[in-house]
Image (cartoon, grey):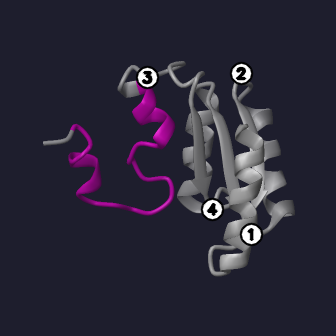
């Protein structure tokens, strides 16, 4: 059984004992092992996207995050960079996944960033 199974038996919402993405990376001994990796994470301006972005960035990864609201995304990035200096890099790409046109434009921008 997973080492995290017991802490998921009873969830109490924000502030409960469940591990963050950053804690799991640390537990797995993967700290600093993402420096040569590129990740694309959708929805980095709220919810699990923020914590996933935070964990990968803190471990030196290059993270491209998609957002529907660039200003909201920039605020999240500023907070992450301020609270956790890293060798990682973050770029934002505007992408509304309910719009095929927006997804195509976002994919084009991701390709430009990674070439």
Residue marked by disc 1:
68
Quadrant occupied by the C terminus: top right
Quadrant occupied by the N terminus: top left
Q: CA distance from mark 4 to mark 2?
A: 22 Å
- The residue lying at 80 percent from left, 34 percent from top is 82
Q: CA distance from mark 3 to mark 1?
A: 30 Å
* Marks 3 and 1, the one that precedes in the sequence: 3
**Region in magenta:** 3-26
Q: CA distance from mark 1 to mark 4?
A: 8 Å
Reply yes or no: does residue 51 show up in magenta.
Answer: no
Q: CA distance from mark 2 to mark 1?
A: 26 Å
* Marks 2 and 1, the one that precedes in the sequence: 1
Label 1: state its secondary structure. Answer: loop
Residue marked by disc 3:
30
- The residue lying at 62 percent from left, 40 percent from top is 54
Q: Position of residue 58 (x, y in %)?
A: 62, 29
Residue 15 got which mark?
Answer: none
Neighbour tally class for label 3: few under 14, some 14-19, many 20 plus, Cα within 10 Å: few
Residue marked by disc 4:
43
Q: Is residue 60 at all visible to an observer of this figure?
A: yes
* Residue 72 versus residue 29 in the image, above or below: below
Residue marked by disc 2:
87
Q: Is residue 37 left or right of residue 18?
A: right
Disc 3 and disc 1 in contact, CB within 8 angstroms: no
* Marks 3 and 4, the one that precedes in the sequence: 3
Q: How many marks?
A: 4
* Residue 80 versus residue 66 in the image, above or below: above
């Amino acid at each position: 059984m997973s080492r995290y199974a017991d802490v998921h038996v009873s969830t109490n919402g924000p502030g409960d004992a469940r591990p963050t993405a950053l804690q799991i990376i640390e537990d797995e001994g993967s700290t600093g092992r993402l420096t040569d990796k590129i990740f694309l994470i959708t929805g980095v301006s709220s919810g699990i996207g923020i914590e996933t972005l935070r964990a990968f960035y803190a471990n030196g990864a290059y993270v491209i995050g998609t957002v529907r609201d660039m200003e909201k995304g920039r605020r999240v990035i500023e907070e992450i960079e301020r609270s956790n200096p890293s060798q990682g890099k973050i770029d934002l790409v505007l992408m509304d996944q309910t719009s095929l046109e927006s997804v195509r434009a976002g994919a084009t921008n991701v390709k430009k960033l990674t070439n």
